[in-house]
């Protein structure tokens, strides 16, 4: 193995600048003449806007302009879009209500955008916003997921009962038949709690318009700058695509929330032209809580059918998915095609039927958040499987193994074809590393100290490497999900890789360079990864869905292959040999069977000086591009085992041990992968124990700050035992499956299964806060006393 | 944040004079409550008088029977003080449990008790230990000082100069943190003093810090956890919020009281 090649734990190249404060984020950019935008946001969850009077506010010191939805309409700026069409069971398209960047007649959640004040300073903009008089007619707010369709008021006129879609997947008749012959049926009711994404860097946007060239520039916190440019130009219509440059520089985390195209960046680009000044907006933390797209928020009833031997024969799921007040960019795909197709888990289940009702409420829009649909699916499958094993009196590990898929490829009843995997291997390894056989001993030891110990499994699967364009197109996606790359070799032999992927914490500058170093044999320091600027990089689809390795790097690999092919031609000319005789190995082009060779850097130089080429035969230069479209999703899978110890006196749950065994296929950088697993688990533990988004009955966000919204801290987490098994992915040239979301997908079920094991009953909801666990433990004590 | 006039007096007398002249004035100590509130535009004093440069407000004094903290003494200084650790270890431990390092390095004892946040830790220590709050005008017993949510006996412009804590025979503080904010969801400070036993509860009461007198009575006979058996705190008058309702808080008062008594007795 090359010390900086594939499989090497290379230290992250980008960390020097990040940890020394030299990263350059959107808010670090300032342009001459820049003005500041402040959004006046709705204090009401649901209200008609009777009037907006900006006259007094416009006279305030420093105010450049104040714009409202009326101005947007006058400039014919379109609304924000949802790029994935979902059809209901009856074939009707989803009910997409209008989503103007600034409210037009109505506000639909607390934090909705009413007007934007542009001023010389942010403080002046805020002062002026306070002087805007808005006359609201307050309407009843629709807040609860479970009862949204029964509400008396409609969030959108197009959806009178607040139903966006009634969607389904699977074979209902076959599933009903399976339940009819079942010997045992396990049922469960689950709430998958709403989460606020909380990336370290809040969103920001800086729009600029050049009157001379009629060009627009948008600096924005985006995970996919080209998609942002496409949506802003082709759909919203703020600027022509070729005139709009979108720059997503260093971005401090996204977890999905920076995929979407929001009101704020739309307004900053549009307003920059209106006021002929650069316009900058930086979210504060409160705004991030209110108006970043949230995640999860499902209410689910599920039933699992088993035959007399404990073999699973059917799964029936009904989910109500809260989509919030508006359909965010990819919101409709998350509780549908990113959710139900994973309901087979790692199990051979012959019949599955899933219904999902997407609903509007007067809450922040809900969209993809680390895992996006797959954590929700895993939570359903792994909770109900665990419960079924308990009801049947079977060991939860054995019950799972009894039902694992063992033959690949395997086509599930919910449209996925798993290409490869070895679920027994990861379970066996996890049991070993978790010291499962001595769990009973540890449980007794805890009991002696007055503590309740429990163990929980999560045998998760995810569909990553998003995604084959043809497949997603047939399911309603408005875009293809391939990726692009260009590999530019400079005359000195250094290499620049232009990738459509976008790094916002993943370490692409290191892992992508490792691939180049490995394949071309160039020192890793001679490789630059260029991303996040539509003026530099060819069109690309960005980073989400654990796709940058499997899809983004596959595109790079394809471009590298072309570079090597061209390099062989160059070397053949220089070495005066036949192209078919040239071999490339260890960074050298060699004439087979001779000691005649040309190293990579010399080949690059020869390609550019072109002295040895006859122009007609060989083009100068060494630069190749590729688009890679995957042939299938990838299916990372694994087993996480969580062991908790509960203090029944206080309800505090301590995670005592955590074992993760993941199969991510081929791994480029094990250190970075382990970091991704750690971060994912931390987020999953956050969801399971700590993070709960609470709106009150009137639609006010109660958890709008860290005083009430609890993020995981180091002290909440144990030292993780992370192990791997490897089945290379056959669906991409590098064998990569993806690792970015696994922890967040696996963790919640593992934690809750451990808690329910400790408590001896299933009645606990996420987040399992001390209060909730104490109450559940009380119930336990009462039950025991009664027995 | 709105604009304000900023003043930085160097003596208590200067600060007091400024306070009488400045309209719509607030004193700022560590600023850990006031500044965030101002940044959110929820507080807008026209004049801010910073007590941070007044040397006479700093420092820790130890005498045979008490520990006296200057009002501007930082939590970290109290936590790290050998004198406090020796004389009233529970007080040092309590200071160590406040917030996080940022808060402890900025927040002050005077600021904490003048603000009288119902979930702050210091009020419980003051009540349980029977502290005396000294101002530029008078001495106030802790029992008379804390008067409800964010309400104290301080008059307009009155400045806390120091807080004097009598040394207890045994004392300890047990805190159950709000999982999100790390404020006390329930904090119980118990102190066995020559004359009595005090059990002061913070974080739980809907009217701020209070004494759990039943527990005090029970512990008077014998200062040990056995004396608390069968005793439970009433949920009446306790806070309910998304983190803990009154029933759970009442239960935690019992648990934290037992743990504090245990810690106090274990200290010997």
Image: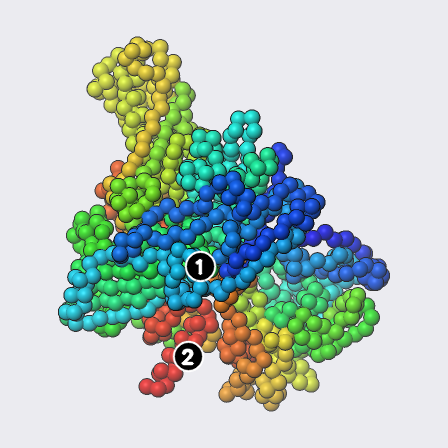
For the residue carrying disc 1, how many other residues have a C-alpha within 10 Å: few (<14), some (14-19), or many (20+)? many
The residue carrying mark 2 is A778
Q: CA distance from mark 2 to mark 1?
A: 40 Å
Give me the disc on residue B105: none
| First of labels 2, 1 by sequence position | 1
In which image quadrant can residue B218 be found?
bottom right
Up/down of A71 relative to B71, above or below = above
The image quadrant where one finds the C terminus of chain A is: bottom left
The image quadrant where one finds the N terminus of chain A is: top left
Q: Give how far across and how far down residue A474 sits, in percent.
A: 26, 45
The residue under the point 50% across, 77% down is B248
The residue under the point 36% across, 59% down is A163
In which image quadrant can residue A617 be found?
top left
Residue farthest to the bottom, as pictured: B221
Looking at this view, is A705 or B210 the one in front? Answer: A705
The residue carrying mark 1 is A155
Chain under numbered label 2: A
Please tell me how many numbered marks the rendered image carries. Answer: 2
The residue under the point 26% across, 60% down is A354
Q: Secondary structure at mark 2?
A: helix
């Amino acid at each position: 193995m090359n010390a900086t090649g594939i499989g090497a734990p290379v230290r992250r190249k980008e960390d020097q600048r990040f940890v020394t404060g030299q990263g350059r984020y959107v808010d670090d950019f300032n342009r001459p003449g820049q003005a500041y935008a402040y959004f006046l946001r709705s204090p009401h969850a649901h209200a008609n806007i009777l009037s907006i009077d900006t006259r007094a506010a416009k006279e305030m010191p420093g105010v450049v302009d104040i714009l409202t939805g009326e101005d947007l309409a006058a400039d014919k700026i379109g609304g924000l879009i949802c790029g994935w069409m979902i059809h209901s069971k009856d074939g009707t398209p989803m009910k997409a209500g209008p989503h103007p960047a600034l409210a037009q007649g109505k506000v639909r959640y607390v934090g909705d955008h009413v007007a934007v004040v542009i001023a010389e300073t942010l403080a002046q903009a805020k002062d002026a916003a306070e002087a805007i008089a808005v006359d609201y007619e307050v309407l009843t707010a629709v807040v609860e997921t479970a009862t949204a369709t029964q509400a008396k008021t409609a969030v959108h006129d197009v959806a009178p009962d607040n139903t966006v879609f009634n969607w389904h997947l699977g074979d209902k008749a076959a599933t009903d038949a399976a339940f009819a012959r079942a010997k045992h049926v396990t049922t469960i009711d689950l709430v998958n709690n709403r989460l606020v994404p909380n990336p370290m860097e809040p969103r920001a946007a800086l729009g600029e318009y050049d009157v001379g060239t009629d060009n627009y520039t948008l600096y924005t916190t985006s995970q996919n700058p080209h998609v942002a440019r496409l949506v802003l130009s082709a759909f919203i219509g703020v600027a022509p695509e070729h005139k709009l440059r979108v720059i997503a520089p260093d971005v401090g985390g996204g977890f999905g929330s920076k995929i979407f195209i929001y009101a704020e960046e739309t307004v900053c680009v549009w307003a920059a032209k209106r006021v002929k000044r650069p316009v900058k907006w930086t979210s504060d933390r409160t705004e991030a809580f209110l108006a970043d797209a949230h995640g999860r928020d499902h209410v689910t009833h599920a039933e699992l059918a088993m035959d007399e031997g404990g073999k699973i024969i059917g799964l029936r799921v009904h989910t109500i998915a809260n989509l919030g007040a508006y359909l965010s960019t990819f919101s409709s795909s998350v509780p549908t095609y990113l959710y139900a197709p994973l309901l087979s888990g790692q199990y051979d289940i012959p019949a599955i039927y899933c219904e999902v009702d997407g609903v509007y409420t007067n809450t922040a829009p809900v969209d993809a958040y680390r895992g996006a649909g797959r954590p929700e699916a895993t939570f359903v499958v792994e909770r109900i499987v665990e419960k079924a094993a308990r009801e049947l009196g079977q060991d939860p590990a054995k019950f799972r193994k009894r039902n694992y898929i063992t033959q690949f490829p395997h086509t599930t009843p919910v449209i996925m074809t798993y290409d490869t995997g070895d679920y027994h291997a990861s379970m066996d390894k996890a049991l070993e590393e978790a010291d499962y056989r001595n769990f009973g001993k540890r449980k007794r030891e805890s009991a002696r100290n007055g503590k309740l110990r429990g163990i929980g499994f999560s045998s998760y699967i995810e569909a990553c490497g998003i995604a084959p364009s043809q497949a997603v197109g047939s399911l309603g996606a408005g875009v293809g999900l391939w990726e692009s790359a260009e590999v530019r070799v400079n005359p000195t032999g250094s290499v620049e890789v232009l990738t459509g992927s976008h790094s916002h914490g993943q370490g692409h500058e290191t892992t992508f360079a490792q691939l180049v170093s490995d394949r071309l044999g160039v020192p890793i320091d001679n490789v630059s990864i260029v991303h996040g600027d539509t003026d530099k990089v060819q069109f690309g689809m960005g980073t989400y869905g654990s796709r940058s390795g499997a899809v983004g790097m596959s595109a790079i690999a394809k471009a590298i292959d072309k570079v090597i092919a061209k390099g062989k031609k160059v070397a053949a000319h220089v070495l005066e040999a036949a192209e078919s005789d040239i071999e490339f190995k260890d960074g050298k082009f060699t004439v087979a069977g001779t000691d005649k060779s040309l190293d990579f850097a010399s080949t690059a130089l020869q390609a550019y000086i072109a002295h040895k080429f006859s122009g007609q035969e060989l083009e100068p230069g060494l630069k190749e591009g590729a688009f890679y479209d995957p042939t299938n999703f990838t299916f990372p899978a694994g087993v996480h085992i969580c062991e908790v110890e509960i203090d029944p006196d206080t309800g505090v749950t301590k995670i005592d041990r955590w074992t993760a065994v993941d199969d991510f296929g081929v791994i480029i950088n094990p250190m970075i992968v382990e970091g991704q697993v750690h971060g994912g688990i931390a987020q999953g533990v956050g969801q399971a124990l700590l993070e709960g988004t609470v709106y009150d009955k009137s639609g006010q966000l109660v958890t709008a700050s860290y005083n009430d919204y609890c993020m995981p801290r180091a002290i909440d987490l144990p030292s993780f035992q992370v192990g791997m098994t490897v089945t290379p992915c056959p669906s991409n040239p590098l064998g990569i499956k993806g690792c970015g979301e696994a922890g967040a997908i696996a963790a919640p079920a593992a934690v809750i299964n451990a808690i329910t094991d400790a408590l001896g009953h299933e009645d606990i909801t996420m987040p399992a806060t001390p209060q909730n666990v104490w109450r559940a433990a009380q119930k336990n004590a009462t039950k025991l006393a009664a027995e | 944040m709105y604009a304000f006039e900023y003043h930085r007096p160097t003596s208590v007398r200067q600060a007091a004079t400024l306070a009488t002249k400045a309209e719509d004035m607030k004193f700022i100590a560590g600023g850990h409550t006031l500044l965030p509130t101002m940044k959110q535009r929820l507080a807008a004093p026209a004049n801010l008088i910073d007590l941070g440069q007044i040397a006479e407000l700093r420092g820790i004094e130890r005498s045979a029977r008490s520990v006296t903290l200057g009002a501007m003494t930082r939590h970290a200084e109290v936590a790290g003080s050998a004198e406090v650790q020796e004389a009233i270890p529970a007080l040092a431990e309590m200071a160590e449990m406040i917030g996080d390092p940022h808060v402890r390095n900025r927040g002050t004892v005077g600021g904490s008790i003048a603000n009288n946040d119902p979930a702050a830790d210091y009020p419980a220590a003051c009540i349980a230990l029977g502290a005396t709050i000294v101002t530029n005008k008078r001495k106030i017993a802790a029992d008379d000082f804390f008067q409800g949510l964010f309400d104290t006996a301080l008059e307009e412009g009155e400045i806390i100069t120091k807080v004097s804590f009598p040394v207890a025979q045994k004392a300890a503080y047990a805190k159950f943190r709000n999982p999100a904010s790390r404020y006390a969801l329930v904090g119980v400070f118990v102190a066995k003093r020559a004359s009595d036993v005090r059990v002061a509860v913070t974080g739980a009461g809907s009217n701020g810090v209070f004494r759990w007198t039943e527990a005090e009575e029970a512990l008077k006979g014998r200062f040990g956890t056995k004396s608390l058996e069968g005793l439970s705190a009433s949920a009446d008058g306790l806070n309910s919020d998304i983190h803990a309702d009154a029933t759970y808080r009442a239960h935690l008062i019992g648990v934290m009281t037992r743990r504090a008594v245990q810690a106090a007795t274990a200290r010997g």
